[in-house]
Image (cartoon, rainbow, N blue to C red):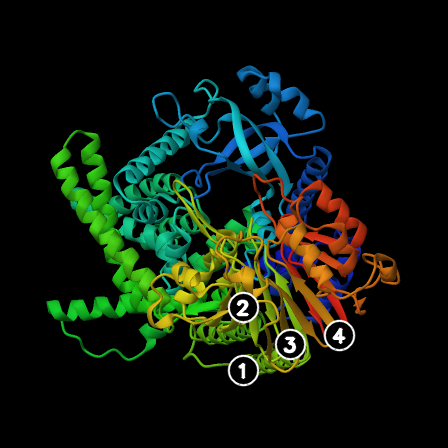
């Protein structure tokens, strides 16, 4: 009955959620007409009438609950969108702090409930603490993710944390609604944040004032929660003060629930080797802690019942300490129900307990169904339960009763748990992350004890140092550091091995994910039948698996066939830098520039690691045929070493091989072929893609006295009747020389008037003029001259730009571009841009779904 209730509620709740996240639309409200077909169906049924009635009732309940939650979030999202457009660049508002889990991340951030309405920005600058309390009283604010410019405002004069969950703050920053992914295949912020009810992002934020919530008037639970929050922050700060950034990130992520504490390179390594779940507080951590607590309390009380009873409230305190994540709540509830069941009061199986907990969580918050953490948590739990059931039904060899036999039995049980979790999450890992680790089980078995020991030594050392025992503290911290450093080194190295994981393209990830889900459903049907008889696969389940497999494979084949004559050109949003990827028919790939790489005081951003490598994997590209570096500035070559270190590039072209060797450093056997380019050079990639270099002249390219921007490589990509010009960072003088040398196709703005305006036609006709222009020098005032733009007369102009201190793009350049281009796209506003062409017509769309042409 619990299974039926969960299935009915989840089926009903999924309809509004899918319509919202996939189609950005709302489903209609339920009416009395829905009950008519339900009554007719019940009339036709006899023996199963009660079950069907319960299923339909819970399905309607899930539909109504989920629709109400979706409407509430959409209302907040609409309000956030209108406020961000009406307020211009900056807003100022009062807010209540909800979550500080990302306070120690690479990007310092907090989640707040903002009390922001019309005219709010004019009022808040005069508010004191009483004014903040009045502004936040008896109001339910919209949830916003706030990225702070620095963390100085969250510390008091003594260096202690002055900001806790529940405090009231006044914030000023740039407000923007949550949008789609920055690049194709990147994390979809709408799918990540909207189910958490986070509707907007505030960047470059500052805390202007704060008012700590006072003990008077607070409930005992709120006081306890704030005390635990303060304790959590103090522990995290002690860990950061004693360990390097990556090692401290492991401890804070794995045991304190802190987010975003790992550098990108370490994060990718642990993901590819399949140990990400170790670094995110989950049911496994609760399980380890509960085993330790039960063992300790059993030794004290000498009674199993008391030990279990005392463990439950301690686990609840740990759940609050670790941030009350879904996986933790699930594990604590399951432990509590299992403890009650063990005493004989309940008598439920592990499967029924897991389903009951899932039903309670969804009933409280149906939007959890759309959260990846919820899906992975219960998929892993179900995988362990099912595999353990099959293992218990299998014939067991006599292992004996000695110590060696107990070790073998423990290894077998541990392997069953790890393997069951990996099998359970495999379909969702393929769907959401487009990869599956091949070494996750062994890596987890080795990493778990190292991480646990390293964290325990590090925390013990930090605690000993806090009470003044410096010598033993140093010993413990050093042991913990060595263990954690070894774990980081091993994870990064293992993750970079070619066999560590399988990466799938977008089309194959969806197909294989659906196939894997159908197979898991068939196995679950066999498991269900094994409750009463020997498990066997049902013919209907096998038929469904066959149908899903055939449909998935055919859909991939059709997609591949449809793109066999299509060229794709991507301009990726990499921040303040350039990166263009051209994929010709047949899969031949050309990349022009790789975006920036820069280091802050406590973070590193590498466009290659963070954007380019994930993108090409999403697109199914495992090898880059030609890389063209326009010039030697870090906002263009910063991401290149990440590609070369993975052996993904065959040929790298630039104006200087010597400078290129300095950029690539010690690439060893992975060093690609280096080629020097100059005006007049040409190459052909595949059958129909021609690349022609139209700048710089050889004399300028070889002259070290010439500024790098002035000798940027300018290339023209030609595919049948389609032309695109990628211009690096050239200025107006170089543009004029290109025009006078007649390297840009002729034409005038008047000749382009026959083209369709924005939105009138999804495909723009290709003419003899330039179809796509990558705007020179990020739209600087000294480039994009009227002479150059008039000569090129591009239909679509793309400005690759991000937050910067140079004023890019300038208003003068934007005015000129608007005069001579039909459409102007900016990667800081429109995110990444994809152009698809068959050589006769082309279409353009942004990664957020906006159609440009």
Q: Earlier in the sequence, mark 1 or mark 2?
A: 1
Residue 665 in percent (x, y) is at: 36, 61
| Mark 4 element type | loop
Examine the rendering and report whether any part of residue 851 can be seen. Answer: no
Mark sitting on residue 677: 2
Mark 3–mark 1 Cα distance, whole angstroms, equals 45 Å
Residue hosting label 1: 542
Mark 1–mark 4 Cα distance, whole angstroms, equals 49 Å
Residue hosting label 4: 721
Residue 248 vertical position relative to residue 580 in the rendered view, above or below = above
Mark 2–mark 3 Cα distance, whole angstroms, equals 18 Å
Q: Earlier in the sequence, mark 4 or mark 2?
A: 2
Residue 353 vertical position relative to residue 329 in the rendered view, above or below = below
Mark 1–mark 2 Cα distance, whole angstroms, equals 58 Å
Between label 1 and label 2, give the one nearer the viewer.
2
Mark 4–mark 2 Cα distance, whole angstroms, equals 25 Å
Q: Earlier in the sequence, mark 2 or mark 3?
A: 2
The reply to whether dot 2 and dot 3 touch (C-beta < 8 Å) is no
Mark 4–mark 3 Cα distance, whole angstroms, equals 11 Å
Residue hosting label 3: 689
């Amino acid at each position: 009955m619990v299974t039926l209730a969960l299935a009915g509620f989840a089926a009903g709740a999924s309809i509004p959620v899918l319509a919202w996240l996939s189609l950005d639309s709302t489903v209609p409200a339920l009416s009395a007409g829905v009950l008519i077909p339900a009554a007719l169906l019940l009339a036709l049924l006899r023996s199963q009438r009660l079950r069907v009635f319960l299923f339909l009732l819970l399905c309607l309940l899930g539909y109504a609950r989920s629709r109400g939650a979706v409407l509430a979030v959409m209302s907040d999202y609409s309000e956030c969108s209108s406020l961000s457009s009406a307020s211009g660049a900056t807003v100022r508002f009062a807010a209540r702090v909800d979550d500080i889990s990302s306070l120690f991340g690479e990007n310092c951030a907090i989640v707040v409930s903002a009390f922001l309405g019309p005219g709010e920005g004019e009022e808040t600058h005069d508010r004191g603490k009483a004014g903040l309390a009045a502004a936040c009283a008896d109001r339910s604010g919209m949830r916003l993710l706030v990225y702070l410019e620095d963390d100085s405002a969250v510390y008091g004069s003594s260096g202690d944390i002055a900001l806790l969950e529940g405090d009231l703050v006044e914030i000023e920053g740039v407000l923007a609604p949550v949008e789609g992914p920055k690049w194709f295949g990147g994390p979809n912020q709408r799918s990540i944040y909207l189910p958490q009810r986070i509707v907007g992002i505030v960047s470059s934020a500052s805390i202007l004032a704060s008012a700590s919530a006072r003990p008077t008037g607070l409930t005992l639970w709120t006081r306890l929660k704030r005390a635990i929050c303060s304790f959590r922050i103090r522990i995290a700060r002690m860990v950061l003060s004693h360990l390097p950034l990556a090692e401290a990130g492991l401890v804070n992520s794995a045991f304190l629930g802190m987010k975003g504490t790992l550098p990108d390179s370490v994060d990718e390594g642990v993901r590819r080797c399949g140990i990400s779940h170790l670094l995110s507080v989950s049911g496994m951590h609760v399980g380890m802690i509960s085993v330790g607590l039960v063992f300790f309390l059993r030794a004290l009380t000498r009674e199993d019942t008391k030990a279990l009873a005392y463990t439950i409230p301690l686990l609840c305190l740990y759940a609050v300490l670790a941030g009350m994540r879904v996986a933790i709540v699930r594990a604590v509830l399951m432990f509590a129900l299992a403890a009650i069941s063990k005493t004989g009061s309940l008598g439920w199986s592990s499967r029924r307990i897991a389903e009951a907990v899932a039903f309670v969580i969804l009933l409280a918050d149906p939007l959890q169904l759309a959260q990846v953490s919820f899906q992975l948590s219960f998929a892993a739990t179900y995988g362990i339960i099912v595999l353990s059931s099959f293992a218990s039904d299998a014939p067991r060899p006599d292992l004996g009763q000695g110590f060696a036999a107990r070790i073998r039995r423990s290894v077998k049980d541990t392997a069953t748990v790890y393997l069951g979790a990996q099998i359970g999450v495999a379909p969702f890992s393929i769907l959401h992350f487009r990869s599956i680790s091949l070494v996750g089980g062994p890596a987890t078995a080795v990493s778990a004890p190292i991480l646990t020991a390293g964290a325990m030594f590090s925390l013990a050392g930090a605690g000993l140092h806090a009470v003044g025992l410096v010598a033993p503290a140093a010993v413990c911290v050093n042991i913990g550091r060595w263990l954690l450093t070894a774990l980081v080194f091993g994870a990064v190295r293992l993750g970079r091995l070619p066999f560590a994981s399988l990466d799938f393209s977008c089309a194959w990830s969806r197909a294989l994910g659906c196939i894997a889900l159908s197979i898991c459903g068939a196995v679950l049907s066999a498991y269900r039948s094994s409750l009463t008889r020997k498990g066997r696969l049902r013919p209907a389940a096998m038929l469904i698996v066959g149908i899903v497999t055939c449909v998935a494979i055919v859909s991939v084949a059709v997609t591949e066939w449809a793109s066999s004559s299509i060229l794709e050109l991507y301009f990726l949003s990499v921040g303040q830098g350039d990166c263009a990827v051209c994929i010709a028919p047949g899969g031949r790939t050309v990349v022009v520039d790789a975006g920036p790489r820069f280091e802050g005081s406590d973070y590193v951003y590498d466009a290659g690691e963070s954007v380019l490598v994930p993108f090409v994997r999403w697109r199914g590209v495992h090898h880059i045929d030609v890389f063209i570096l326009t010039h030697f500035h870090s906002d263009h070559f910063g991401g290149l070493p990440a590609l070369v270190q993975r052996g993904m590039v065959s040929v790298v072209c630039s104006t200087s091989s010597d400078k290129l060797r300095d950029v690539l450093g010690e690439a060893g056997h992975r060093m690609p072929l280096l080629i020097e380019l100059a005006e007049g050079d040409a190459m052909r990639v595949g059958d129909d893609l021609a690349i022609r270099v139209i700048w710089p002249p050889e004399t300028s390219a070889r002259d070290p006295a010439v500024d790098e921007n002035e000798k940027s490589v300018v290339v023209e990509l030609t595919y049948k009747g389609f032309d695109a010009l990628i211009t690096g960072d050239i200025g107006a003088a170089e543009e004029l020389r290109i025009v006078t040398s007649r390297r840009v196709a002729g034409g005038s703005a008047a000749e382009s008037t026959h083209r369709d305006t924005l939105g009138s036609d999804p495909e723009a006709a290709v003419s003899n003029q330039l179809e796509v222009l990558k705007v020179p020098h990020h739209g600087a005032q000294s480039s994009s001259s009227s002479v150059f733009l008039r000569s090129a007369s591009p239909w679509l102009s793309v400005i690759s730009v991000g937050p910067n201190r140079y004023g890019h793009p300038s208003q003068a350049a934007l005015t000129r571009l608007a005069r001579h281009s039909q459409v102007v796209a900016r990667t800081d506003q429109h995110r990444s841009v994809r152009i698809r062409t068959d050589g006769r017509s082309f279409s353009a769309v942004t990664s957020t779904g906006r159609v440009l042409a």
